[in-house]
Amino acid sequence: MSEVLTVTNDVQAAPSSTSNKISDVTVRPVVEFIEAINRGDLDAAIAQLAPEHVHHGRVSNYHAEGVRVLFTLLRSVLPDLRLDIREQRVEGNRVVTRIVGTGVHTGSYLGKEPTGRPVAWQSVDIAEIKPGVRENDWRIADRSWDVFSDPSLWQEIGFIPAIMC
């Protein structure tokens, strides 16, 4: 059985039904990861990942340092990057999160000059949460999240024509 969580704009998730300790503990590393990304604190974001963490993307799979490279790249293209949780579902130790990313395209990417336009895109993060070494120290162990999967992002920054989206 899954539990749907409602979300406020400040990235805090609250269960829509009676809260239980497992859901709170399970969701916490995902929420803290996103809050850290929004603050630009990559060390705090990476701290939410288990040592054996694997991030599964469309192009490749990578570990924690690859996550650091990915978000460093995103911040160079979108310095005001913001990720907002719109919905979360908890199923056992799996957290499914619908995220909307926003920012202004002020950095170049793959030789493409910045457009100066605001961009927004949507993605889905599926994270498997596992307990850490200490009590209540749960971490993201496995994640499938392709932050670049929404073609509207590529269209908005001028990489693909609007007719292709």
Image (tube, grey):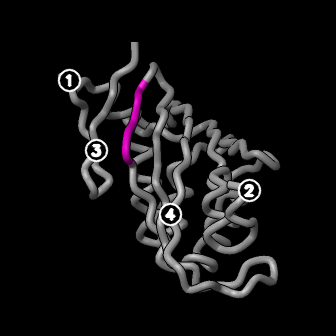
- Residue that numbered label 4 is attached to: 120
The residue nearer to you, when weighing 117 against 100, is 117
Q: Amino acid at mark 4?
A: Ala
Residue 81, relative to residue 89: is it above or below?
A: below
- Residue that numbered label 1 is attached to: 17
Residue 67, relative to residue 146: is it above or below?
A: below
As measured in the structure, the alpha-carbon distance from the residue carrying label 2 to the one carrying label 3 is: 32 Å
- Residue that numbered label 3 is attached to: 7
User: Which residue reaches farthest left?
Assistant: 18
Tell me, yes or no, whether the highlighted magenta stretch contains residue 57: no
> Closer to the N terminus: mark 4 or mark 2?
4
Count neighbours of disc 3 (C-alpha within 10 A) and say few if under 14, some if 14 to 19, many if 20 or more. Answer: some
Count neighbours of disc 4 (C-alpha within 10 A) and say few if under 14, some if 14 to 19, many if 20 or more. Answer: some
Q: Is residue 126 left or right of residue 91?
A: right
Q: Amino acid at mark 1?
A: Ser
On residue 9, the disc is none
Q: Amino acid at mark 2?
A: Met
> Closer to the N terminus: mark 4 or mark 3?
3
Residue at 67% over, 50% down:
149
The residue nearer to you, when weighing 2 against 32, is 2
Q: Quarter of the image for the C terminus: give it.
A: bottom right
- Residue that numbered label 2 is attached to: 164
> Closer to the N terminus: mark 2 or mark 1?
1
Nearest to the eye among marks 2 and 3: give it.
2
> Closer to the N terminus: mark 4 or mark 1?
1
The residue nearer to you, when weighing 73 against 160, is 160
How far across and how far down the image is residue 20, in percent?
25, 23
> Closer to the N terminus: mark 2 or mark 3?
3
> Closer to the N terminus: mark 1 or mark 3?
3
As measured in the structure, the alpha-carbon distance from the residue carrying label 4 to the one carrying label 2 is: 17 Å
Magenta region: 86-90
Labelled pair 1, 3 in contact (Cβ < 8 Å): no
